[in-house]
Image (spheres, rainbow, N blue to C red):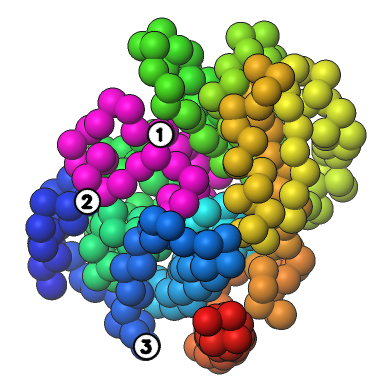
Amino acid sequence: MSTLAPLEKNAGLVHAVETTLLAAPDREIEVLGRVPAGASRAEAVAHLRRAATEVRRRAVQTVGAAGAGHIGGEFSITDALVTLYLSVMNISPAQVEERDPERDRIVLSKGHAANALYTTLAVGGYIAPEALRTFLQPTSMLNGHPARTKIHAVEASTGPLGHGLPIAVGMALAARLDGSDRRTFVLLGDGELQEGSNWEAFMTAGHQRLDRLVALVDRNRLQQGARVADTNDLEPLADKLRAFGWEVVEVDGNDVGALLDAYAGVPAASGKPTFVLAHTDKGFPVSYMRDDVAWHHKVPSAEQVAQALTELDAVLASIDTEEEVTS
């Protein structure tokens, strides 16, 4: 047994645990933190692309070592998570630890993407990177689905699909009652939108004109075992949300620059809540995972982990080259 203890106040876990540790990664993820103040757009995009790529290369090693996870859907939502935590939201590790009432709130409704959330929290400085080696281990704070009783930065325990948006609507209503300008963000899976509880929440948010509420759907078109369209088709999704009183923005959800632009329009001038329809690919950008339903819950072999790292390292190299050209 190995003991993992918080290194400082902002280590982020509710308490230390004694548990087995997963095999160490080839290198531990670096805490990159927020986009630096005063960064140009190009610098902000490069920072977020680098962070998202580092999250993916660490996350695939975690799933390989743990023998479980939801790597495909974690890769498709990573750009949205990184863009929110490292640029868009009014949030920091200090605000979380001090429970600043004016911090923005975020709910990961597709809680099975917990590994992507934990790794984003590590790259943002909310939890110690070495805590990632306890993922799914006995007594770990890093469960297969996020729990607010275990990690300070987790605002809501999720996993049962269809619950995150109703919780977020309640948070947005609470902010209004408090007279607060804080915003509430919720990230959903597209298969999850087959749950009726979401549509009750969409209707309520539209009726209440919760303009500081933002829902992003990870529209990767795949769910467990099948394509969403073959299971229970959601289209015309954008038109449905407009009919429910939402401002709809469609973007490439694997493009951090496009996500920055989408979030820049919040709150919408119309006074409506914002729905970001983020078109993504499951498994992005790894070639053998991309748009393949098998990778909803598949575990990569050692050879597949190595191939993913090779492809992701090529992405990092291209970011380095672009930065050199523009510097």
Q: CA distance from mark 3 to mark 1?
A: 34 Å
Disc 3 residue crowd, few under 14, some 14–19, many 20+, Cα 10 Å: few
* Left or right of 190, for residue 266: left
Write down the residue under mark 3.
Answer: 26
Res. 151 in view: no
Write down the residue under mark 2.
Answer: 12
Q: Residue at x 22, y 45 (%)?
A: 94
The percent position of residue 9, horizontal first and vertical second, equals 11, 51
Q: Earlier in the sequence, mark 3 or mark 1?
A: 3
Write down the residue under mark 1.
Answer: 104
Q: Give whichever of 299, 150 is nearer the camera.
A: 150
Q: Amino acid at mark 3?
A: Asp
Q: Amino acid at mark 1?
A: Asp
Q: Residue at x 59, y 21 (%)?
A: 211
Q: Earlier in the sequence, mark 3 or mark 2?
A: 2
Q: Amino acid at mark 2?
A: Gly
Res. 306 in view: yes
Disc 2 residue crowd, few under 14, some 14–19, many 20+, Cα 10 Å: many
In this view, 108 is above or below 1: above
123 is within the stretch colored magenta: no
In this view, 112 is above or below 20: above
In this view, 13 is above or below 43: above
Within the image, what quadrant is residue 286 found in?
bottom right
92 is within the stretch colored magenta: yes
| Secondary structure found at label 3 | loop
Q: Earlier in the sequence, mark 2 or mark 1?
A: 2
In the rendered structure, which segment of residues is drawn in magenta?
84-113
The nearer-to-camera label among 3 and 1 is 1
Q: Give whichever of 153, 18 is nearer the camera.
A: 153
Q: CA distance from mark 2 to mark 1?
A: 17 Å
In this view, 8 is above or below 175: below
